[in-house]
Amino acid sequence: MYIFSQVKAAEWALDNGVATVICNAREGSRALQALTGEQRAVIINKLADLLLTRQTDILKANQIDVDKAYTDGVDDVLISRLVLNEKKLKTLHTGLKQIAKTCDSIVGRVTRRTQVAEGLELCQVTAPIGVLMVIFESRPDALPQVAALAISSANGLLLKGGKEASNSNKLLHELVEEALEPFVPKETVALVSRKEDIEDLLQMTNYIDLVIPRGSSDMIAKIQAASKGIPVLGHSEGVCHVYIDKEANHDMALKIVRDSKCDYPSACNAVETVLINKHLLKSTFFETLLDMLKSEGVKIYAGPRMSSVLKFGPPPAVSLHKEYGGLELTMEIVENTTEAVNHINKYSSSHTDVIITDNEHYASEFLKGVDSACVFHNASTRFADGYRFGLGAEVGISTTRIHARGPVGVEGLLTSKWLLQGHGQAAADFADGQEQFIHKSLPLDYSDKVSESSDDDNSTEGQQ
């Protein structure tokens, strides 16, 4: 049945020209590999500059999308993600410039050298994954970020944005094409316009190498369920925690909780549950914390233990595994750091979790014990971000435990290949004892880099 459905999907794709789009992206990846890192940096720098020089056009297209979203009754959380402004474009520009600076050390970097035998040297080098498909909801700023990461890592790219951002995405994609065209085919980064195409594309295992969904937990779950053999890199939800220890600096705790919840409540790295050490419950700090959250418009729900202690406290939380995506959060009481760690490992989504404490022993226990992609001490959950990590941008946050975890930047879009250089050796020479294996690790010169166009697979065919 699965083989049949694959065949039907391939037939459909060929009939609708989608296979051509994917094949163009594959050829585009090879053309990008044939460029130098410096040339790929020129493409990304041009795209970064276009975000500012075409700012008026971008914001005009985005306003059309925002106005329609309000008319259509789109959820406020999605609209907040949809909106572009001068500040966001400036941040995008800065992030893309960061990515461009790293281009020369990405593809073809030697990560391991081994002398297999006399005159036989083996190198492991970084290489692009191939063709990526990134699916994102109403976040048009994701388009140039992801495009820049794909160009830097020499991957072909298919992009599917939410219909809410159709005008914004169309214009931003045109800017990507403009930046690409002097060096490689503009089809290297393609925009998939129809939602109906996605399910069939997810069955095309011979064409697409990695799917990265960005958006709501429901959307990501649907993509993961629909993918037929193509690896999916994503996260299920953003149920992030902040634990306030009994030895926390109170001013610091207030600042971190406010930032984690109120800076951007709809982000996946916003805090959804605040855990309070029981010793703080009767303190003036606890009252100050509640007052601060209420003054910020945050609605508080109580976990079971807090409900039992505070008879006239906040209304009970429906679930301890809740991603609100707005100005709401759950608050619960824990005995100590060990109980906080156990609670988080049970109820969090393994995204980002924080301890606030001045006690280094408690901090160490928390950092080692919490099984999440990002675990912080005395810092806001909002730092779980590719730009803030210095990655330039991210294709998304991964809570999977294979390949890449946490904010996924350029390094998460690379695989490796092995290059063996010899002088006519044959495996049979070692079997009969004529030659001996050495398997000696050789030192890495971190400037070592294999030319991206050094093998036959990296054809320049398709370059313009």
Image (cartoon, helix red, strand yellow):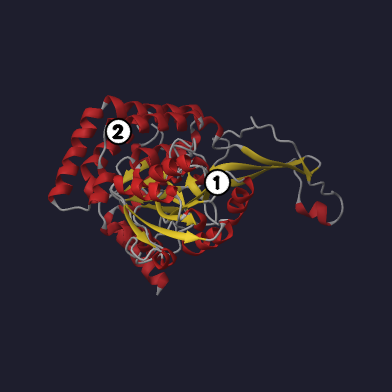
Q: Look at the image and tell me whether residue 421 can be seen.
A: no
Q: Position of residue 368 (x, y in %)?
A: 61, 53
Q: Which quadrant would residue 316 be assigned to in this image?
A: bottom left
Rate crowding at label 1 as few (under 14), some (14 to 19) or many (20 or more) other CA atoms within 10 Å: many
Q: In the rendered structure, which disc, 1 or 2, sits on the residue that comes first in sequence?
A: 2
User: Label 1 amino acid?
Assistant: Thr
Residue depicted at 87% across the width and 53% down the height: 433
Nearer to me, 314 or 342: 314
Q: Quadrant of the N terminus?
A: bottom left
Q: Position of residue 431 (x, y in %)?
A: 82, 57
Question: Is disc 1 placed on a helix, strand or loop?
Answer: loop
Q: Look at the image and tell me whether residue 329 can be seen.
A: yes
- Tell me if 348 is positioned left or right of 364 in this view: left
User: Label 2 amino acid?
Assistant: Leu
Q: Residue furthest bottom?
A: 1
Q: Residue furthest right?
A: 433
- Tell me if 97 is positioned left or right of 355 in this view: left
- Report the number of numbered marks: 2
Q: Position of residue 97 (x, y in %)?
A: 43, 28
Q: Residue 175: which numbered mark, if any?
A: 2
Nearer to me, 142 or 123: 142
Per the model, the C-alpha gap separating discs 1 and 2 is 46 Å
Residue depicted at 69% across the width and 32% down the height: 445
- Tell me if 100 is positioned left or right of 263 in this view: right
Q: Quadrant of the C terminus?
A: top left
Residue on which disc 1 sits:
357
Q: Position of residue 81 (x, y in %)?
A: 29, 45
Q: Is residue 290 above or below residue 346?
A: above
Question: Is disc 2 placed on a helix, strand or loop?
Answer: helix
